[in-house]
Image (cartoon, coloured by chain):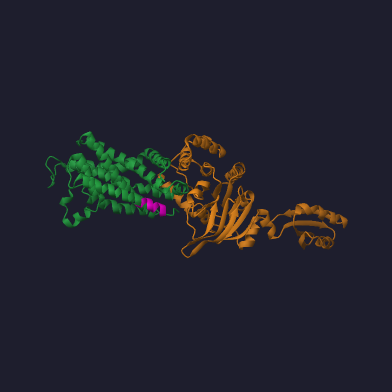
Chain colours: A orange, B green
Amino acid sequence: MSAIIIKELTKKFGEFTAVDSVSFSVEPGELFGLLGPNGAGKTTIINMLTTLLLPTAGDAEIAGYDLRQDPGEVRNNIGIIFQDPSLDIGLTGRENLEFHAMMYNIGSDERKKRIREVLDVVGLADKADILVENYSGGMKRRLEIARGLIHYPKVLFLDEPTLGLDAQTRRSIWDHIRNLNRNYGTSVILTTHYMEEADFLCDRIAIIDHGKIIALDTPSGLKNCLRGDCVSLTIEGRVDLIAAALGEKEWVKEIVPKGKTLDVILSDYEKNIPDIFQTASNLGIEISSINFSKPSLEDVFIRLTGSIIREQEGSRQSVRRDRMRRRMLR
Amino acid sequence: MIQRKVIYILWRREMIKYFRARSRMAGAIGMPAFMLIFQGMGFRRVEFPGLPESIGYFQYLVPGIIGMTLLFTAAYAGMSVIMDKQFGFLKEVMVTPASRVSIVLGMISGSATTSLIQALIIMMMSVLLGFRLPFLPAVLSSFMIMVLISMIFINIGLILSSVLKDFHGFSTVINFIAFPLFLLSGALFPVSNLPASIRILSYFDPLTYGVDALRGVLIGHCEFSIVLDVCILLTLSVLMICTSSYFFRRAETI
């Protein structure tokens, strides 16, 4: 049974189609990424899958329960970490977790045990009893992740889990996400517009733009579909000879001579580089240096959407909220 | 569909926040306290037609100010929902499997408790200022009436909060509703002194019956009958709870 099956899910806001007939499925234990620029429709998909928004058309099944028929059971089996903050800053960390566990009807002993457990997972055990308004951004995020785990969800949604966090905190949150995916076997769907994040974490990635899926594959699959790996050789000797010899190999896709260097576009460079050296030495040609590069997801994205991904430090709504929160606390 | 744990934790959250935010407590008590002191003392010797001589204006005013406290604190319960919405916490509440009815009941019970506490503070204050309390059973039954009054206005606040998005809008609308309700209710003067055209409006004001019932049990004087008052209050609170549950089930929370 798949963790999630989505069939032609669509959401319209008036005339505007935010999500346009999206279909995909996620396997149990998979780390699945939705990658796309802001406003591509990622959050709208998440909001529909977590029962906060009603789809205009299409169906979805989460952990075996139909989104429309059985929203209660869907809610029981999912956890979500929202893009914008969703903690009660007037409560302590522990009280936030306690609240959540009670809402999921977890009994008293079990509750205490699980709260201790998730606080350890995110390393907040010693900060649990101070008010959340005194937490740093990274601590709040970690608390939200802890909260998402308390009820042992089968499917966990993470909407831009590291938006606006510094590099170090981002790294530690990635580790948390990986660990919980491995240790609990939780299926994870995360949205992001950070290329490295999707590349580092996800088993498969769907690239979304203007409410549509424009590509869906493993990170390496996406990169391979681009053009393959590139090996640059600097040659002492006759460039044309080796270019001709390599041109006959079936794993070579393209050869671009540039003076003394030769760009070879090929598949599986790890496997085929020895062959390049072999060919060169058979011809008595010396390779003085070698350089390889794999295409990045960024290249894939540019190729597919014709634009670079638009980075932004935080969503406009969350900036507005922060401003308001400051005003209210005065 | 009624989950006790859900109601309890929502209630407890409200209590924790109420007792942590002392300034909120003091702020909400300020206005009725000033009314009690200045209006009550200033008009002490005024005699209203239609009021028995044995009841001084201060005795008459206290149940009205208690009603006012309940009206304003209860109606502002919607404000905390708006704040949860703005700060994203309401989404967290709504993605849980807790039944929507339990969520609404939890919110109501929390706010009802805080408004009752506020009203009791005002009551104690008025005793210090010279209000003569009736016997204990009458005081206890006045608590029941207070609960009914706060139910009605909490639900008005909740319904508004499910429709409105930001709290500037909310406080404007709630003031626009709460002030006329307060002034029309007879909290400050006997409704019978109003000209007939305006008096009719006061019959549509739930607080009129609330204040009247409070006067009935606390000072033994009312314009209608306590039974009628309580019946109206009871019917309205049940109706309002159903309406606000409906609105909450229907609302998309983002």
| Total marks placed | 0
In terms of secondary structure, what is the magenta stretch mainly?
Answer: helix
Determine whether A19 is above or below B183 in the image: below
Q: Nearer the viewer, residue A210 or B37?
A: A210
Give coordinates of residue A19: x percent, y percent: 53, 60
Give coordinates of residue B155: x percent, y percent: 34, 49
Q: Is residue B246 magenta?
A: yes
Q: Nearer the viewer, residue A73 or A279?
A: A73
In the picture, the quarter occupied by the C terminus of chain A is top left
Give coordinates of residue A260: x percent, y percent: 80, 60
Tell me, yes or no, if residue A50 can be seen here.
Answer: yes
Q: Nearer the viewer, residue A24 or A136?
A: A24
Q: Residue at x 50, y 55 (%)?
A: A48
Determine whether A193 is above or below B226 in the image: below
Tell me, yes or no, if residue B128 can be seen here.
Answer: no
Q: Is residue B16 magenta?
A: no
Give left or right: position of B179 versus B165.
left
Give left or right: position of A13 versus A169.
left
Residue range highlighted in magenta: B243-250
Q: Residue at x 13, y 47 (%)?
A: B50
Give left or right: position of B246 versus A294.
left
Determine whether B162 is above or below B226 in the image: below
Q: Check the image and name the residue furthest to the bottom.
A: A15
Give coordinates of residue A43: x percent, y percent: 52, 55
